[in-house]
Amino acid sequence: MESRIKNLIQAEIDGENTSQESEELERILKTNPEANALFKQMLSISNRLEQIKADIKLPENTDFASQFEKNVTNAPVTYLKTGPKQTNEEYTMSESNNFFKSSTFAWVVAAASILILVLYISADIPQPAQEQVVGTIGVDRIERAERYRATQITSADIILDNEQYQQVLQSDQFQRLVESGELQELAQNQSFVNLMRDPSIQELMRNEQMISLISDTKLVELMREPAFLQLMREPSMIELMRTAVDDRSFTELMFSDRVAGIIDSPGFTNLMREPGFISLMRESSVNELIAQESFVELMRNEAFVRLARDASFVSLFHTSSNVSLMRSADIEVLERNASFAELMRDPAFTQLMRHEGFIRLMRESSFVSLMRSPFAVELMRDAFFVELLREPAFVQLMREPGFVELMRSSFAVELMREPAFIALMREPAFVSLMREQAFVSLMRESAFVSLLREPSFVSLMREPTFVSLMRTSSFVELMRESAFIQLMNSAGFHELMRENRFATLRSQ
Amino acid sequence: MFTKRVARFFFAIFMITGVLYVGGLTTVSAQFKSVQTNDLNLLYYDVGHEFLVNHTIRSYTNALIFHKSLFDYTLSEPVTLIMQDFGDFGNAGASAVPRNVVLMGIAPFHYAFETNPANERINVLMNHELVHIVALDKPSASDRFFRKALFGKVDPVQSDPVSMFYGYLTTPRRFSPRWYHEGIAEFLTTWMSGGIGRVMGAYDEMMFRTMVRDGARIYDAIGLESEGTTVDFEVGANSYMYGTRFMSYLALHYGPESLIKWTARSDDSRRHFSSQFRNVYGNSLSQVWGEWIEWEHEFQRENLNRIRTNPVTVGRPLSNRPLGAISRAIYDDVNNQIYVAVAEPGKVAHIAIVNPETGSMRRLTDLEGPALFFVSSLAYDAQTSTLFYTNNNNGWRDLHSVNVETGRSELRIKNVRTGDLAFNSADNSLWGIRHFNGIVSVVRMPYPYTEWNRIHSMPYGHDIFDIDVSPDGKLLTAAIADASGNQKLKMMQIEELMDGVFNPEEIFDFAESSPAGFTFSPDGKQLFGSTYYSGVSNIVRYDIEEKSIEWLTNAETGLFRPIPVWQDSLIAFEYTGRGFLPVKIPNEPAERVSAIRFLGQEVVVNHPVVKDWMLPPPSPDFVDVDTIVHTRTDYSPIRNLALNSAYPIVRGYKNYVAGGFRADFSDPLRMHKMSISASWSPHPGLASDEHFHASFSYELPSWHFFANYNAADFYDLFGPTKRSRKGYAIGTGYRANLIYDVPRVMDFSVTTTYFGGMERLPEFQNIITSFDSFISLNARLTYQSTLFSLGAVDHEKGVRWELMSSNNYVEQTLFPRINQNLDYGFALPIRHSSIWLRSSAGISFSPRREPLGNFYFGGFGNNWIDNQSSRRYRAFYSFPGTELNEVAGTNFGKLMVEWTLPPVRFKRAGFLNLYANWTQLNFFASGLFTNIDDSAFLERYYNAGAQLETRLVIFSTLDSMFSVGYAVARNDISGVYSNELMVSLRIMR
């Protein structure tokens, strides 16, 4: 509790408050339960003392303190007999002293006890009425000098502005930062100075949470990073700070360990110059991301930095699935994959990442899953992959686990390079076939590629009978037969597939 | 011709002003921020100080409201208040001339010997400094008239001494002694703070009680200024103590309101402070001062009798004499010696080793920048015999160490800003208290003591000081003060501190008394310290296990800084009029200790009106900053440049008198200063183009620009040296501090000037030129590291080196010269007496026949009335005993030996308006060789002489020097003797 409140309470009890102070205390008591409790306690004690005083007839000499001293400290040693037989026998401290009459002695003991209690409660009140404490006998045999001292101001009267920042300024880490000269350089950056003058930033700086963040020694350590200082000089960063004032999660993010881990990456400062990335940083989902160590590692990657400059890439983060990807442990696998790293450096891949289709694909969880495949890197690097991306059917297929499973194999790369594959992909039957494990296994056969190259294959896929045939276990054997290929290309085979009878026959 | 030259002159001014305008806007404006109310212009330069801005405005406004009412004062202009953190300890200064300015240091006060109050300091400083502003600035009707007539308050300047009189007419109370100003400020500050302050000060009581006990002289008003503020170890602080005491005496006997009548300037008041004293009190100041001294003797005799009602503690002295001001002392039980930093008049401050058996002392190492009361902070590592100490104790402290065996010292951390050192032998770390941005922090310096780590920072207004670490390294004790001025002895667990937990346990609440210098006993079971609890500083012992406190002494004067050395006794320092004396006292409880009476208590009991002078808290409830602040902006010196004053002047031109006018401009911070003067010599003997004289100067912190036309000089009216010159000059200069680490200072300056229409050399008045225009480029590099002791009148030891280059370019020919001076001095065992060896050598790279190619020497160089250094005989170009510029040469070597005798101080020599401080005799002898490279032109001179210097004080504040010198010179080639008598009065410092 503030000392000033305690003083007000005590002065109120003593009737020393002005009307303004009494009103102020009344307001405080309404809102401060602790103060209210103390007030009631002290009032109760005071009332009891008043009651006791009324019962005690004081001597004519009103110098109570000196009388008390004389009678208590200098009187012969006395004692109070105890036990049932002595209930009514009392020995006064001094028989000749009328003050301690037998009828009032018990009251005096009670009063003394309460007085001690009052003194005990008041012990931490800084400035009780000074005139009452001077000139008394102090410790042991030591006389205390009389020195007038009025009730003093307290810390509560001293209202400072953002004193909490001093906790940062006083630290040795911060001082070393200052001595390095980097901070001065920053302070000379007009953009930074303007930022600090911005009312919204100043408002932010008054926020307790923000102060608490800034007071953290981690920030001081962060500020010692030249890269952080460089970052703070970036107009875009300043703009970001200005607009993100109300976003507590953002401010927490900015002063997090994670950011401290990112900022010394060579490209990060460049990244902060990109409006797209700034926009990205405002995404709440990104905040979650940055909490992931793997993502932080990714942000250290220069290629990623290049990528992140793209607005379309930024749009990826509008979906939770991509964020999930980035949050997943898989990203770490990717990071450790040398090919992926190489891929990230490949301009073509960067180009790919900007592709609308890829962005659509990235929203598919199955594709995200595919990214874990070691062959995925090779796949995505291939030019034909871009062609595939143009096909809406490809995206649809990516929703099929079987297709995704297929894509994980090295064979998939070869398969997808086949021009006919795109045509095949467009066939609705193909999509339904991909749901069948047997067909997926079939596609893994090298003969399937040969089959795919046959001009009639795609058109046959439109025939339900052929599709049914493909589902049979014997189709694998058939597929390997050159005679079957020849047969398949014959006009009669097409006719045959259209015949219901063939279908009936096959089913028998 | 005349018109053309004048036009050139003003064109130059125009150009320079233009350069300045741009320079001023681009270089300086961003450094200071300005927050303005109608009554205040608060300037600060560090964002780290911003947290105090609003509180300072509230404290200022709170104090101003009170002063306006008490003094019936109307502020003539807003006060410019500059917040700064240039030193580790809080202080402030105020001036009302030419503008109202307060310079406030935000650092915490030091509390050594309880010489400063412990309550919230900005409040205290505002209360105090605004008394100065009111006492200086409040005008009477006549003051207002002269301020209007002279366009402001005139600040006396050396170049035009007539300004002294204008200064007296516009701000007469500025010409009052320091005790007067500090006395009223301390008196009022005490009551404005509700009884906390010097009027209630235990140190002040001790000082006067000791003087009475010892039969020492209590100075009269003149003696105080002429001798009292210089001869004892309290030096300038005596102005505060005497002033407050005298004011308190007057308040007690004539009422506190009488002080207001005396110190407040009003229409019916007398101009001079002593005349107004008689007006108010009906007696002369000297007479009432004498009455006070008599009363003081009686008052202190009564106090001594009170103390003597119980057995008085008498210690056995452990040194042959008092040590002056002392630091915390350390006892080395291995070598049986005491280490203590001492500062006493007549000896350069140093760390002394005291042998407690014999009382003998020896110097371990010199201290640079000792503090007045606590000198330095010490801590000791017994294992490595390393003593840690702080230098530059009045600025930003540096941490040094010295090996007590070898005496080898080492700088550990520059600008550590930390003191109150304590060594933790458990982990060999050094602990201390750091002051920065007005905040106090506990810091720890691990081995090898080259960096520090903050352990805990206190909230503003809470101070921690006088720390000690227990022998086992587990506990740290400290005195902790809060904003109310309460001071408690507290103890902390070091392990908790290291974990970031600040949870001190209270040991004892000493209320308004400071728990001073508490230190652990060798077994760590007890603490020993001192307190003024009874009004007298006595030694107390605290038993940590028993949690009990015992008073060990009943001292007559005061005992401080105990060192528990032996089981049955300890070392403490007893206050005496000549400083602190180490004594051995028994380690036993005192029977009883009686309290003394305080003069301040008598004042408040007899005149309870002073209770009403306490201010309300400077809280937002009383002063709403948001409603009174109207501007927050960057401070621009050039935009704040304004006319300070303008007044008539008289100057000399050659042998004629010139009359004219001078105008001075500056910004409130005085970062930019501009002066313009113009005068006219009507004498018909002058050529038509020599009647008019003008000069212009503009000074920035590093740059200065100037222009003269037929330069006139006041001092040419008196004496042989002439500085007025025909012709015009326009130039610029730059100066910079390359090193500023007092006492080590290195300055660099360069000045270039174009001279036109000249007939004599600007530097050498007796050398006529054959050309009328040339360009000069002069550069100077100076290094100085000199020390002086308390009460010194001059530097007493050290080294000074100067390298100068003078280059003149005339008619496509360059005349370069270079010379250097090297001075070395050492102190003699006699107080304030030194021997200095001064040497000079130079060479010119020009033909001997060319006037500009030579160095010239001769004479003392002082004018009868002068404004330059009075000890001009030390300059390389001076050679007393010969004529001015009599000796010449293209190269030279000069060697001087000088003996400065101790100054003789006057206890009373003069009157309140004119008195002598001291007089000092200096002897010198020198030899000068010129044209050493050519025996045909070789000149050899020797001289010997003496100069008697007498410091005079005019109008209480204007220091002047009256000098009489005599020298005999011998031309060793011709064998001719010559002599010279010099009499000179240098006006103002």
Image (tube, coloured by chain):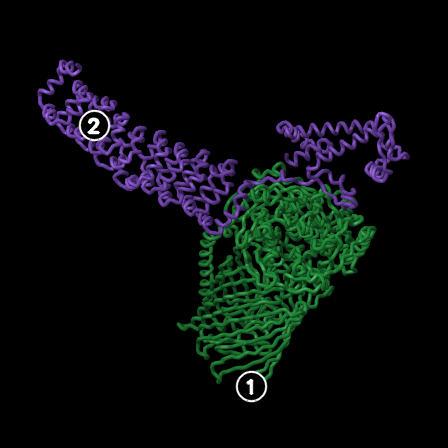
Label annotation for residue A443: 2
Q: Residue B366 carries which label?
A: none
Residue A77 percent coordinates (x, y)? 85, 37
Q: Which chain is purple?
A: A
Q: What residue type is labelled 2?
A: Met
Foreground residue among B785 and B153: B785
Quarter of the rendering occupied by the C terminus of chain B: bottom right
Q: How crowded is mark 1: few (under 14 residues within 10 Å), some or many (20 or more)?
A: few
Residue found 45% across the figure and 63% down from its top: B8
User: Residue placed at 73% from the left, 27% from the top?
Assistant: A44
Residue B643 in percent (x, y) is at: 55, 54
Answer with left or right where residue A331 lies relative to residue B686.
left
Is B394 on the left-hand or right-hand side of A58? left
Question: What's the distance in space between the residues labelled 2 and 1, CA to CA?
Answer: 125 Å
Determine the secondary structure under disc 1: loop
Q: Residues within 10 Å of mark 2 (few under 14, many from 20)?
A: many
Is A487 or B591 nearer to us in this picture?
A487
Q: Which chain is green?
A: B
| Amino acid under disc 1 | Ser
Q: Residue B288: where, in percent of width, then height?
A: 78, 55
Q: Which residue lies furthest to the left in this view?
A: A491
* Side of B801 where A19 appears, left or right: right
Q: Pointer 1: what residue?
A: B974
Chain label for disc 1: B
